[in-house]
Image (spheres, rainbow, N blue to C red):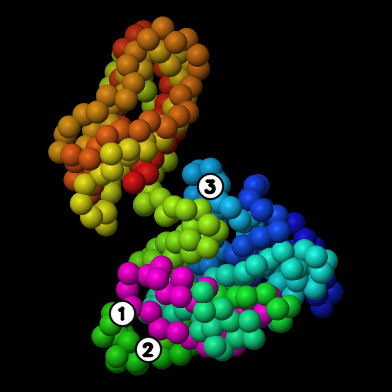
Amino acid sequence: MQQFTTSGATGYNLIADWPGGDPNDVLMLGGHLDSVSAGPGINDNGSGSAGLLEVALTVARQSFAPRKHIRFGWWGAEELGLVGSTYYVNNLPTAERSRIEAYLNFDMIGSPNAGYFVYSASGQPTGSLQLQQTLQAAFSVPTELTSVGGRSDHAAFARAGIPIGGTFTGAEVTKTAAQAQKWGGTSGVAFDRCYHRSCDTASNIDATALDRDSDAIAYALWTLADSGGTPPGPRFENLTDVTIPDLSTVESPITVSGVSGNAPSALAVGVDITHTYRGDLVIDLVAPDGTAFRVKTSSNDSADNLVTTYAVNASGEVANGTWKLRVQDVASNDVGRINGWSLQF
Ligand code: DPN
Ligand code: ZN
């Protein structure tokens, strides 16, 4: 955490380095955490902050090990004039600055009347065609280029000579009829009619746009960091506690939607169960059509708790529908609870 002072107040940047990778080849991604004082700033810029956080969590879950070093930045006081990001860049030693090979910015990525914009390389002092084209390729919907000028935190990096890129779903500008035709939404209305207003609340988010742009962050990261792979597919979770009484069977559902075709041959089933004798537990993953895949049998393993991931060959099952984790306690005395579980496609 980096502190700075602006007009007599203290502000904060949060910098998160993912260990590993070449320290001389840093790929940095960021967005601002603050909002204007007029409103809560959920699209501007809770959306970019949350998208970046979700990608960072995915990096950790996957033990991502690309050739390059990865750094995330969440900036303070963007709305006061790019204060946090400028402070960060200005206080980087020259050698450190030259190690950052690119900076990608995400500011407003869940606009309620969304457009799909990629920062144009040509509107920037250090615009990069490679970054622009990678972000364009990250979308399965049509994109347009936009000249964001110096309106967000990438500007501090551009001024320091660092190549920049980013995505944006639109602010105060009105959506045209042609744009409404290709992207849906309402023509003649701003991409975000609550931009810098008190109505920029949690209902001021198009979840589809936030999802597409967050996927684009992951795609760009996996591609530009030289990972040699592609980002993992969608992940679903159920974090509702389910108690496991003695000698009983309980189930916890996860409804999967928006995944085409069948489940993968290594569907990752993450399980987090508290129990005082885990050998008592028999666990099945139940597919939407009722097919049960046994992932764990009972045993005399007397250890507590079960926090692990199972790989299930579910390639014969349609992905969409309601999956269940079925947990049986088959011996008396010890009990527990499902804390949560997940499906990573
Ligand atoms: N900088 C944004 C704001 O915080 O008001 C608006 C914006 C974001 C404009 C991204 C252009 C591109
Ligand atoms: Zn913003």
Three-letter code, disc 3: Phe
Indicate yes or no whether the magenta region holds residue 153: yes
Mark 2 lies on residue? 175
Hey, which quadrant is residue 212 in on the image? bottom left
In the depicted view, which residue is nearer to us: 74 or 96? Answer: 96
The answer to whether residue 256 is seen in the rendering is yes
The tag earlier along the polypeptide, 3 or 2, is 3
Q: Image height check: is 246 above or below 166?
A: above
What type is the residue that disc 2 sits on?
Lys
Say the numbered circle drawn on residue 64. 3
Give SS at disc 3: loop
Quadrant where the image shows the N terminus: bottom right
Are the residues at dot 1 and dot 2 in contact (C-beta closer than 8 Å)? yes
Q: Give, as a single range, the part of the protein colored magenta.
A: 131-158
* Residue 222 percent location from the top left of the image: 49, 57
Label 1 neighbour load within 10 Å: few <14, some 14-19, many 20+: some
Tell me what residue is drawn at x 48 percent, y 22 percent.
305
Q: Residue 144's x, y, as percent?
A: 40, 83
Q: For the point 47% across and 28% down, which residue is it?
A: 307
Image position of 39 (left or right of 185): right
- First-in-chain label (3 vs 1): 3
Circle 1: element type = helix
- The residue indicated by pointer 1 is 183
Residue 29 lies in quadrant: bottom right
